[in-house]
Image (cartoon, rainbow, N blue to C red):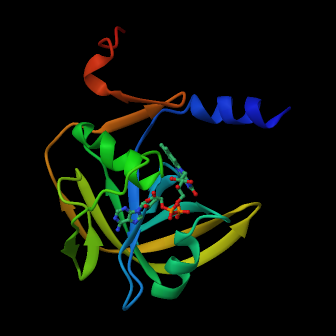
Amino acid sequence: MDDRQFRNAMGKFATGVTVIATEVAGEEVHGMTANGFMSVSLTPKLVVISIGEKAKILPKIKESNNFTVNILAANQQELSMIFAGQLKEHKEVIFDRLDGKPVIPGAIAQIACEVSAEHVEGDHTLFIGKVTDIHLEDAEPLVFYSGRYRSLKEDQPVTV
Ligand code: FAD
């Protein structure tokens, strides 16, 4: 099995798109696009994110010990591209605050977390986040599938 086949297989799992954000005291807020995110536990309320070993945000989360997960709306594809380094020009992004942590305005879910554990697995670090606050907006999600951005609206209704 080669890397391409593994990537293609993982890309068959349709996901939402998040921007993970964190802030080290005295530095600019740093964001990164990620779909390696899932819910872990209800009691206590825990989530997990998966951050590549080369990502600049990795040492920042270790230092700040907190992060936010911002689930993007269908009209926020440009933000996903900004925080994935897919745009050539630098665009300024204004952050709101939730529980004192930086969050993306207009995200359909803003989830503030304190790091409760971290596990290095292969070339990624899994951060378990204890959820400290949540803010929700009623809008359609941005979807990522097979390496492309999608929206729920373009899909056909499911027939049973
Ligand atoms: P950088 O390369 O420094 O930052 C990424 C970009 O964000 C840069 O262009 C930077 O200018 C911009 N940026 C950062 N902060 C700000 C700010 N305050 N204002 C304006 N711009 C800012 N990688 C993973 O590790 N885990 C995943 O789960 C994951 N999922 C992904 C899902 C999708 C759909 C995509 C497209 C990419 C995913 N990636 C994932 C890859 C990851 O987004 C990129 O490799 C990213 O560029 C690495 O970010 P970095 O922390 O090294 O930061």
- Give the quarter of the figure containing the N terminus: top right
Question: In front here: 32 or 125?
Answer: 32
State the image coordinates of residue 49 (x, y, percent, origin top left).
Answer: 52, 61
Q: Residue furthest left?
A: 138
The image quarter in which residue 111 lies: bottom left
Give the residue drawn at x 28%, y 73%: 102
At 59% from the left and 64% from the top, the residue drawn is 55
Label count reads: 0
Locate residue 57, reporting x and y percent.
Answer: 52, 70
Residue 104 falls in which quadrant of the image? Answer: bottom left
In the image, is 69 to the left or to the right of 58?
Answer: left
Image coords of residue 98 (percent x, y): 21, 74
Quadrant including the C terminus: top left
Q: Position of residue 37 (x, y in %)?
A: 48, 54
Q: Is residue 146 left or right of residue 1?
A: left
The front one of 80 and 82 is 82
Is 160 situated above or below 101?
above
Q: To which quarter of the image does residue 131 belong?
A: bottom left
Instruction: Between residue 85 and residue 99, name the one nearer to us.
Output: 85
* Residue depicted at x 53% and y 31%: 147
Q: Is residue 142 visible?
A: yes
Asked if residue 138 is positioned above or below residue 54 in the image, the reply reads above
Q: Residue furthest front?
A: 89
122 left or right of 58 in image: right
Q: Residue at x 46, y 72 (%)?
A: 129
